[in-house]
């Protein structure tokens, strides 16, 4: 917002002048600082109290601070404390009840608000939204929490736009940040040399007019905007909020609540660090004679076993009830009560959960968004033995000396509606049917990338343009793209295994903002055996880190040589939530998943695609049975957890 | 000249160095030299004395083996964080491959004689360095075996009997 005074620039060395102005009238400045190695919101007496050069690194269940990152003072995205500490303290006296000893008469004296005069320095956009939510909840209805209102009225708010984000951030999805739009008196955007400053209220304009410094240059304003835009891009859009309320309320019986409860410790951390959770309980301490009774309000949590207890019973006796209560209130019924979601996307509940329960992941699992990957089961075309849909070969594009990509045009639209990772059974007169995974879906055709490994595939590759091919499909399970929402994605392909993974890249790039970093590690036998070489470069340009390696070098090859695990050996995936999709020869998948597990990817988030002898593709012929699975019907995509000891076990 | 303290920190930020004790990192950093090398630079020659041990900080290195009449073949490439010249610490101290920079690279180099002197004098360092060295060499051994399996080959050459 440009004010009458205009957008200002405050040089870093004059930050003390801002503190002086904020302190006028006896205010205490509260801002981020580091105390005993922990990020806290505390008194900022001098500029030196601000955490210059400190940064946070967050992931589910993990928080680390480190210093030495330059001079910036607002690089800690957030810590465990939110501003409700000051507007809605953890313990607050609300009144006294007295009994007069002489005649037994009683009296009640509510506490009169006596708010400290504070200036909040460094309030993030999500925090402003949280204060706005508390304004509605505690001071916007028929009944008002007077102490809260007084504290809010007595506080100046100096916001900071985020130029960094943490892995738990999802303000972009909740519509609260990272841009500061309302609810502030002043707003700063930190650059290396100083701060771009704007006012957001009459009080802020008065402060701005007295601030030393000068008008910001167009270059500084542009740099500030670009930094915030880069933060937005880094966060992406990890939570699909469209229709989330209804999706969530439709899932009160989801089995997932119980699964979360198995991990949840009911420690209440998520509610304590949440900037909007407002539930409290009162406690009374009295003297021995019962004459003086002091009533205090303290933060409580719906995760506490006694929170919903009444005489004779408990309305939410099980942990899964309490988790469901919290999540559905925060993301659904809060909207009914207060007209806004109760979540601002600050990510604290993700980071400070001791077992790393990630609310973004739970929302996607319990109330999945309507992404293409989440389409309901599509009954495949020609789903009975002996039947195939006729398709016409439109083109054949050679990929390597023995592999080509065929463009097939079906008349049956179901064949185009498959998921990444699904396959089709291919049949031609004179040959038994064989499975080929789909290497791309397009609006009127699908692509099959086929290697001439035997007579049937050779015959398919020799089909002339205009010739006909029978297909049954799409069949089997696909790669679960929804599990990758908000996460980093590692795709590891070996040889022809890149073909079933190409639709994964297509799906991730079609919705790029919803996923974290994407790494594609591709191993091939020789440089000439690599598939889709033109596209590999294009993917790099679109934000995929593409690493290629060959077993055997060849003429003109100046790239990497070795096995695909060499690309992953020295990486650490533990610090950010990561999902991996792996496809290639089974031995290669074994080595790859072993390295990925060592690097911190959990078995539940490691997906592999198995190859087995298939003749029908619909679980009837029995060829592909493996333990409890028919690979064609229950796979080919499995998590390592599902496969357990069956994975790479010889002879099963 | 970069201060040894900062070299120890650089070493600690690599895969190889992160598995060493602080003591080991400091001792190694005191001997180490930070060097930028151009593409094509030869850091070690196969069969010759291993003159240096190094940790790749940035870039890409090729390990090449020569066959008379066939030229040299790159058998593997070394990623940042990993080492080269491990034979500087293993008798007979002769390089098992030629090490060539494929890209502009940054390396931490230790002169092999000095490294061996240091190891002889410092048991703590020895106890820290050799397991990590073996881990790297063992990864290469495993990777090379996997390469030998020729997993992406079309024909199954090995029948299960």
Image (tube, coloured by chain):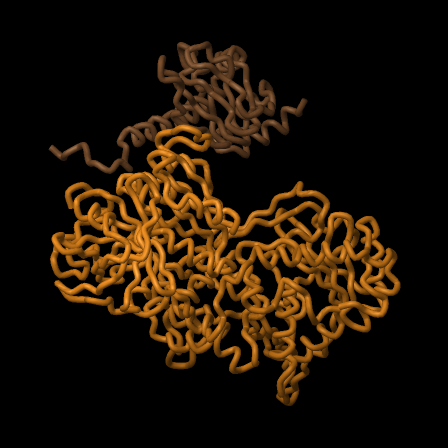
Chain colours: A orange, B brown
Residue at 23%, 67% (x, y): give it.
Answer: A381
Front-lying residue, A569 or A186: A569
Residue at 34%, 74% (x, y): give it.
Answer: A253
Up the image or down, A437 lies above or below B95; here it is below
Q: Is residue A425 visible?
A: yes
Total residue callouts:
0
Residue at 54%, 12% (x, y): give it.
Answer: B114
Instruction: Estimate the x, y position of residue A450 in percent, counting from the top left.
Output: 27, 48
Front-lying residue, A582 or A135: A582
Q: Is residue A269 visible?
A: no
Instruction: Estimate the x, y position of residue A338 in percent, counting from the top left.
Output: 56, 81
Horizontally, is A387 left or right of A402 in the view?
A: left
Instruction: Estimate the x, y position of residue A604 in percent, counting from the top left.
Output: 34, 53
Instruction: Estimate the x, y position of residue B6 in percent, counting from the top left.
Output: 63, 29
The N terminus of chain A appears in which quarter of the rendering? bottom right
In the figure, residue A285 lies in which quadrant? Answer: bottom right
Horizontally, is A639 left or right of A116 in the view?
A: left
Horizontally, is A457 left or right of A176 in the view?
A: left
């Amino acid at each position: 917002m440009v004010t009458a005074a205009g957008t200002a620039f405050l040089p870093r060395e004059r930050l003390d002048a801002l503190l002086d102005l904020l302190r006028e009238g006896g205010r205490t400045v509260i801002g981020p600082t580091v105390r005993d190695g922990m990020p806290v919101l505390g008194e900022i007496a001098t500029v030196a109290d601000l955490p210059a050069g400190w940064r946070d690194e967050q992931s589910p269940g993990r928080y680390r601070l480190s210093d030495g990152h330059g001079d910036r003072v607002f690089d800690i995205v957030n810590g465990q404390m939110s501003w409700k500490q000051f507007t809605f303290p953890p313990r607050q006296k609300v009144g006294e009840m007295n009994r007069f000893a002489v005649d037994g008469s009683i009296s009640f004296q509510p506490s009169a608000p006596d708010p400290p005069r504070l200036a909040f320095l460094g309030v993030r956009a999500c925090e402003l939204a949280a204060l706005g939510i508390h304004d509605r909840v505690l001071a916007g209805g028929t009944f008002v929490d007077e102490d809260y209102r007084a504290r809010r009225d007595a506080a100046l708010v100096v916001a900071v736009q985020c130029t960094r984000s943490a892995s738990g951030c999802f303000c972009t999805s909740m519509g609260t940040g990272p841009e500061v739009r309302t609810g502030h008196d002043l707003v700063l955007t930190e650059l290396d040399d100083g701060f771009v400053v704007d006012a957001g209220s009459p009080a802020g304009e008065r402060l701005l007019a007295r601030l030393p410094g000068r008008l910001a240059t167009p270059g500084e304003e542009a740099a500030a905007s670009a930094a915030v835009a880069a933060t937005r891009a880094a966060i992406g859009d990890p939570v699909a909020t469209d229709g989330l309320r209804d999706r969530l309320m439709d899932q009160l019986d989801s089995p997932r609540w119980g699964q979360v409860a198995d991990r949840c410790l009911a420690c209440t951390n998520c509610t304590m660090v949440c900037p909007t959770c407002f539930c409290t309980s009162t406690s009374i301490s009295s003297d021995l004679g019962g004459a003086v009774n002091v009533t205090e309000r303290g933060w409580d949590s719906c995760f506490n076993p006694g929170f919903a207890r009444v005489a004779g019973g408990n309305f939410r006796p099980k942990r899964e009830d309490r988790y469901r209560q919290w999540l559905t209130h925060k993301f659904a019924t809060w909207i009914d009560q207060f007209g806004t979601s109760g979540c601002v996307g600050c990510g604290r509940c993700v980071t400070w959960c001791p077992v790393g329960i990630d609310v973004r992941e739970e929302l996607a699992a319990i109330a999945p968004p309507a992404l293409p990957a989440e389409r309901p089961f599509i009954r495949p075309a020609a789903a009975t033995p002996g039947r195939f849909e006729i398709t016409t070969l439109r083109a054949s594009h050679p990929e390597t000396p023995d592999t080509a990509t065929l463009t097939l045009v079906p008349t049956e639209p179901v064949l185009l509606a498959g998921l990444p990772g699904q396959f089709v059974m291919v049949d031609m007169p004179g040959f038994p049917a064989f499975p080929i995974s789909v290497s791309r879906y397009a609006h009127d055709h699908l692509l099959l990338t086929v290697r001439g490994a035997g007579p049937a595939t050779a015959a398919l590759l020799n089909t002339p343009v205009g010739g006909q091919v029978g297909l049954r499909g799409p069949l089997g399970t696909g790669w679960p793209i929804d599990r990758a929402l908000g996460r980093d994605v590692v795709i590891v392909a070996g040889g022809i295994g890149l073909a079933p993974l190409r639709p994964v890249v297509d799906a991730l790039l079609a919705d790029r903002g919803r996923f974290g970093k994407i790494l594609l590690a591709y191993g091939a036998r020789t440089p000439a055996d690599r598939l889709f070489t033109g596209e590999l470069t294009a993917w790099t340009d679109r934000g995929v880190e593409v690493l290629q390696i060959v077993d055997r070098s060849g003429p003109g090859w100046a790239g990497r040589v070795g096995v695909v695990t060499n690309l992953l050996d020295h990486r650490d995936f533990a610090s950010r939530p990561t999902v991996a999709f792996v496809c290639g020869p089974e031995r290669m998948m074994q080595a790859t998943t072993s390295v990925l597990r060592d690097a911190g990817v959990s078995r539940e988030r490691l997906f592999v695609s198995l190859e087995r002898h298939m003749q029908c593709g619909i679980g009837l012929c029995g060829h592909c049975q493996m333990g409890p699975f028919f690979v064609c019907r229950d796979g080919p995509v499995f998590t390592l957890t599902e496969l357990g000891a069956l994975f790479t076990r010889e002879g099963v | 000249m970069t201060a040894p303290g900062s070299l120890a920190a650089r070493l600690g930020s690599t895969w190889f160095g992160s598995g060493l004790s602080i003591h080991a990192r400091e001792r190694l950093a005191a001997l180490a030299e930070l060097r930028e090398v151009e593409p094509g630079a030869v850091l070690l020659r196969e069969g010759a004395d291993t003159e240096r041990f190094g940790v790749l900080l940035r870039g890409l290195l090729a390990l090449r083996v020569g066959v008379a009449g066939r030229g040299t073949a790159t058998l593997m490439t070394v990623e940042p964080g990993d080492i080269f010249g491990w034979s500087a610490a293993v008798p007979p101290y002769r390089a098992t491959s030629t090490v060539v920079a494929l890209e502009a690279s940054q390396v931490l180099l230790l002169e092999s004689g000095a490294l061996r002197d240091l190891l002889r004098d410092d048991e703590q360092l020895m106890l820290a360095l050799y397991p990590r060295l073996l881990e790297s060499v063992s990864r290469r051994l495993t990777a090379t075996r996997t390469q030998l399996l020729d997993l992406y080959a079309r024909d199954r050459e090995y029948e299960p009997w």
